[in-house]
Image (tube, rainbow, N blue to C red):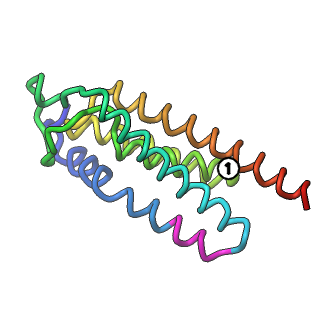
Amino acid sequence: MAGRNFLIDMLMIFISNKVRFIFIFVLIFMLFRNYSHKKVALSAITTAAFTLFINSVIRLVYFKPRPFVKHRVGILIPSKVDSSFPSKHTLLVFAVATSIFLRERVLGSIMLGLSVLTGLSRIWVGHHFPSDIIGSAFISIFTSIGIGKFSNWFTSNLKSKN
């Protein structure tokens, strides 16, 4: 579908390249709000770091060529010729969005919507297959839930010992 509609192509390039700055801004804003927001932001940052670790491990043991390598796919922005799975952009935005959604439903819902758009944009610009995006989203969602449950368990155990 890329290359057929200039406006949609430009929108997808913009989303693919710039939405991450919205996520960074939200995290910085939350870090400087109250204690509750700071906890949410720190959880999101921890989850993002852990998903980057998972990304590194997967890339060490699994390689999947990008769509434009195996198929005749027009790419709208330059890309490395590294593994298509997992999508680092998708991993990070879903990790942050899910972490926030677990504690702040409204803001988290908006960020999850932006995450879906980011994943779609990565397919549109020719960098990933749909399965890369779906798999990356699931990895991030489950990592966020796991870290959220662990941090809740850890915090409650610290409080009960004091």
> Residue furthest toward the bottom?
32
The residue shown at (52%, 45%) is 112
Q: Reply above or below: 83 against 43.
A: above
At horizontal 12% and vertical 48% (from top left) the residue drawn is 78
Check the image and report above or below for 146 versus 111: above
Query: Toward the viewer: 131 or 139?
Result: 139
Residue 160 in the image, given as x and y percentages of width and height? 91, 54
The boundaries of the magenta stretch are 26-33
Q: Is residue 44 left or right of residue 127?
A: right
Q: Which residue position holds label 1? A: 105
At label 1, which amino acid type do we have?
Answer: Arg
Indicate whether residue 136 is drawn in magenta: no
How many marks do you count on the picture? Answer: 1
**For this view, does 140 lie left or right of residue 119?**
right
What percent of the width, then of the height, locates residue 51?
Answer: 46, 44
Which quadrant: the C terminus? bottom right
Residue 6: image x %, image y %? 16, 46
The picture quadrant where one finds residue 57 is: top left
Instruction: Tell me which corner region of the image, top left, top right, bottom left or bottom right, holds residue 38.
Output: bottom right
